[in-house]
Image (cartoon, grey):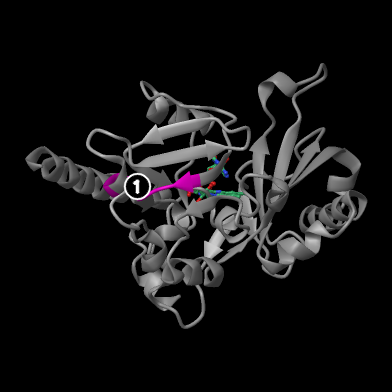
């Protein structure tokens, strides 16, 4: 952990997007052919030697048998998907890679979005860390404008919990989560005029457990004990056609988007170098 922390270069400031995150994805995807709803079930790689000049080295296969043939594959699925063995690799992944996949952890996170009829917190409040509270971190936010009803806009508070405590919270019923969250906010913002301001202005709640997302199944990777080289082993290419990217493959800046983006740049550079070399070798044959 110490080693990973030392490699964190992005400081402690928050960067808050003023528009949905999809704008970043759409920008990066513009001009790229993207197959949606295409779950890879099998990756066949390393066939370059046997397939002859001009033939594609890899095949990515979907459950219904659809195939994409290509020169190389960059695997960017979350660690949980690799751990679960959702994708079969042929030939099988080397033991160092499998060891790293099994040892690096990935925990879940739960977000509790509480919508209120009116704002009961001070104008300059926007977040609080309450390590021993039911919700260890809380943000105040505006409710999206399309959700406004006659009689004034609603506001929202988002509670966030990760790791073991998120797993505990995921086992509770929504009623218990709502009651415990409101009790915490009532205690934080009680006044003589309204001793339970959160309860009295509560409108609705949405609880999101990220381990329930079938293609994500978690939130953040975390380092394995006493295995400093695991992230490097996870990132390591296999042969000249299988590459790995994604937040868990970053040796320092891992559980975040900029880390994931950096690993993509690293994997593309590795791929270009290897594919160029391979093509040069083939052209000499
Ligand atoms: C609640 C929450 C809050 C967060 N907040 C922040 C934040 O404020 N700032 C920040 O920087 N980071 C944040 N993160 C972390 C950030 O979202 C991740 O670090 C980042 O998305 C990781 O990117 P990735 O490309 O490695 O993986 P992902 O973004 O998880 O992408 C992996 C992709 O693989 C796809 N996939 C899975 N299985 C298959 C398959 N078999 N075939 C084909 N595709 C498949 C998935 O559908 C997914 O699209 C947050 C994460 C969570 C859960």
Q: Is residue 202 above or below residue 238?
A: above
Residue 40 lies, in percent from the top left, at 55, 40
Look at the image and tell me whether residue 284 can be seen: yes
Query: Which residue lies most toward the left here?
Result: 284
**Numbered circles on residues, count:** 1
Query: Which residue is label 1 attached to?
Result: 47
Magenta span: 43-49
Task: Decide whether residue 48 is among the magenta residues.
Answer: yes
Q: Residue at x 79, y 65 (%)?
A: 168
Q: Residue at x 37, y 63 (%)?
A: 8
Cβ(mark 1) to ligand 1 < 8 Å? no
In the visual, does 168 lie left or right of 216? right
How many neighbours does mark 1 have within 10 angstroms: few (below 14), some (14-19), or many (20 or more)? some
Q: Is residue 217 above or below residue 63?
A: below
Q: Is residue 179 above or below residue 152?
A: below
Which quadrant of the structure image shows residue 247? bottom left
Look at the image and tell me whether residue 254 can be seen: no
Q: Secondary structure at mark 1?
A: loop
Residue 10 lies, in percent from the top left, at 36, 56
Q: Residue at x 33, y 57 (%)?
A: 237
In the visual, does 205 lie left or right of 11? right
Query: Which residue lies most toward the bottom here?
Result: 226
Task: Decide whether residue 56 is among the magenta residues.
Answer: no
Q: Nearer the viewer, residue 38 or 46?
A: 46
In the visual, does 2 lie left or right of 139? left
Residue 219 lies, in percent from the top left, at 60, 54
The N terminus: image quadrant: bottom left
The C terminus: image quadrant: top left
Residue 262 lies, in percent from the top left, at 34, 49
């Amino acid at each position: 952990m110490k080693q990973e922390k030392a490699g964190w270069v992005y400081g402690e400031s928050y960067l808050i997007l003023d528009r949905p995150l999809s704008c970043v994805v759409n920008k990066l995807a513009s001009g790229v052919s993207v197959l949606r709803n295409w779950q890879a079930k099998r990756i066949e790689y390393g066939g370059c030697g046997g397939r002859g000049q001009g033939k594609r080295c890899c095949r990515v296969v979907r459950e219904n048998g659809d195939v994409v043939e290509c020169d190389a594959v960059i695997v960017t699925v979350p660690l949980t998907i690799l751990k679960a063995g959702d994708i079969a690799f042929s030939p099988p992944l080397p033991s160092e890679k499998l060891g790293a996949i099994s040892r690096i952890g990935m925990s879940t996170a739960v977000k509790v979005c509480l919508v209120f009829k009116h704002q009961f917190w001070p104008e300059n409040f926007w977040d609080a860390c309450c390590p021993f509270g039911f919700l260890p971190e809380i943000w105040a936010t505006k409710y999206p404008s399309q959700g406004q009803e006659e009689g004034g806009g609603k506001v929202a508070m988002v509670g966030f919990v990760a790791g073991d405590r998120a797993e505990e919270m995921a086992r509770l019923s929504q009623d218990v989560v709502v009651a415990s969250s409101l009790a915490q906010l009532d205690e934080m913002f009680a006044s003589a005029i309204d001793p339970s301001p959160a309860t009295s202005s509560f409108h609705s709640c949405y609880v999101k457990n990220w381990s329930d997302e079938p293609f994500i199944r978690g939130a953040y990777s975390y380092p394995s004990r006493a295995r400093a080289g695991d992230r490097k082993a996870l990132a390591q290419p296999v042969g000249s056609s299988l590459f790995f990217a994604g937040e868990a493959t970053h040796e320092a800046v891992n559980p975040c988007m900029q880390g994931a983006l950096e690993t993509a740049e690293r994997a593309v550079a590795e791929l270009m170098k290897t594919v160029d070399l391979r093509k040069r070798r083939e052209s000499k044959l």
